[in-house]
Image: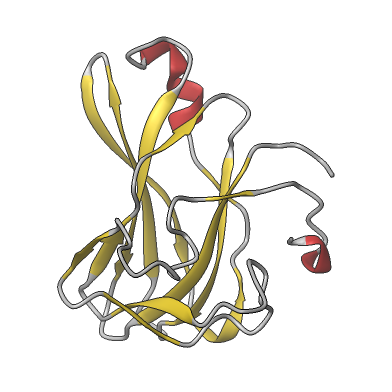
Amino acid sequence: MFLPWADPAAYTLAPGGDFEGVGTSWQLASGAKRVRGNEPFMVHESTDTRSLSIPAGGSATSPAICVGLGDPTLRLFAIGGGAASELKVEVIYETALGTVTQPVGYVPERDAWGPTLQLPFLANATGLLSLDGLTASVLFRFTALGSVGWKIDDVYVDPWKVT
């Protein structure tokens, strides 16, 4: 799916990561909402018509997805921001030591829809601290920092498998 951007990995769609479902199970805060308009590359499905709008100060948290050592990166499509407005991406997960929130990265201003760079996250490497010792159930939180909002679409996790 990201092959046009020189990325041959076989990604897995995060739960509800296409924002097409009426009953999306994402946790939306401070005005974030599902809106009309899809990333123009139609990576998930050619019939998709929705994306997620996150206004300045708003956030959206994905449903849980189970990851292991083979699930190292996150990738999505985004548009928005400004010179001082970034999209903050975090991973949240439970370990035997409690809840951990880690920054994954910041997406800089984008004036057109496009894929983000690969965003590696470390929750998969904490399997030894996870409740079962092998995997971690993670949530991804996206927060619009600064004074300009964002739109995101087609959120994927890369299991490091080449197609």
Quadrant location of the N terminus?
Answer: bottom right
Q: Where is residue 162 in the image (x, y as percent from the top left)?
A: 82, 41
Q: Which percent across, then down, holds residue 44?
A: 63, 66
Total numbered labels placed on residues in the image: 0
User: Which colour assignment does the render follow?
Assistant: secondary structure
Q: Residue at x 43, y 11 (%)?
A: 128
Indicate whether 117 appears above or below 113. above
> Observer-nearest residue: 103 or 23?
23
Identify whether 129 is placed above or below 86. above
Q: Measured along the vertical axis of the image, is residue 124 above or below residue 145?
A: above
Residue located at (47% from left, 60% from top): 17
64 relative position to 47: left or right: left
Viewer-proximal residue, 48 or 134? 48
Residue drawn 56% across the image and 77% down it: 48
Give x and y (percent) for residue 130: 36, 17
Q: Which residue is drawn at 73% across and 46% down?
A: 10
Q: Is residue 63 left or right of residue 158?
A: left
Residue situated furthest left in the rendering: 30
Q: Which quadrant does the C terminus fall into?
A: top right
